[in-house]
Image (cartoon, grey):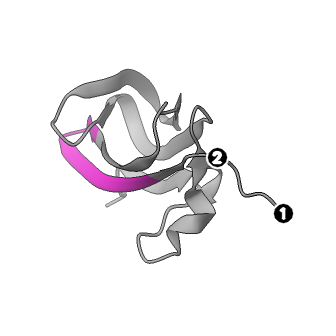
Amino acid sequence: MKKLVKLVKVNNLQYNANRDPEVYRRSANENFRIQALVDGTGAVKCKLLDSTGKTLHEQTVNAPGTYTHEISFATPGVRVVTLSVEGNGEKFAQDLRLDVMEHAWIG
């Protein structure tokens, strides 16, 4: 049986919760690019949810295909968003940690 989501990427890098979060960091008002490579057939519903469960973005993708969304935050801090994918009788959810810096590194 095939997996519903083959790969999750943040800022064009495969997402790994154990990787140093510095590789995914962005400055305030700079976009994070979130992608999910979806496998299978038919229509698949992809959602991006904030920590309170509020939907930030929702899109239907024809599988096999790629869900892509860019999101930015105006204030610094750590955000946890959940990527939720449903289709073909399967469900997938993964929390993504997004670190927002006040400004870019100087030097």
Q: What is the magenta segment's predominant secondary structure?
A: strand
Among the 4 quarters of the image, the one containing residue 30: top right
**Would you say the residues marked 2 and 1 are in contact, meaning their CB atoms lie under 8 Å apart?**
no
Secondary structure of residue under mark 2: loop
**Residue 58 shown left or right of residue 25 in the figure:** left
Q: Which residue shows up at 30% across the image and 40% down it?
A: 85
Q: Secondary structure at mark 1?
A: loop
Along the line of sight, the residue nearer the viewer: 97 or 73: 73
Between 77 and 53, the residue placed more toward the observer is 77
Q: Amino acid at mark 1?
A: Gly
Residue 20 appears at what percent x and percent y? 53, 75
Q: Quadrant of residue 25?
A: bottom right
Q: Left or right? Give the position of 53 relative to 62.
A: left
Rendered residue at 44%/26% (across/down): 61
Q: What's the mark number on residue 103?
A: 2
User: Is residue 102 in the magenta section?
Assistant: no
Can you say whether 79 is above or below 42 in the image?
A: below
* Label 2, residues with CA under 10 Å away: few <14, some 14-19, many ≥20: few
Q: Quadrant of the C terminus?
A: bottom right
Q: Residues within 10 Å of mark 1 (few under 14, many from 20)?
A: few
* Residue 95 within the magenta-colored segment of the rendering: yes
Say which amino acid is labelled 2.
His
Label at residue 107:
1
Instruction: Identify the residue at image location x=38%, y=22%.
Output: 60
Q: What count of labels does the image hold?
A: 2
Range of residues picked out in magenta:
85-98
Calculate the distance from the C-alpha at mark 2 to the C-alpha at mark 1: 12 Å
The residue at 28%/41% (across/down) is 84
Where residue 49 appears, as percent x and y from the top left, is 27, 35
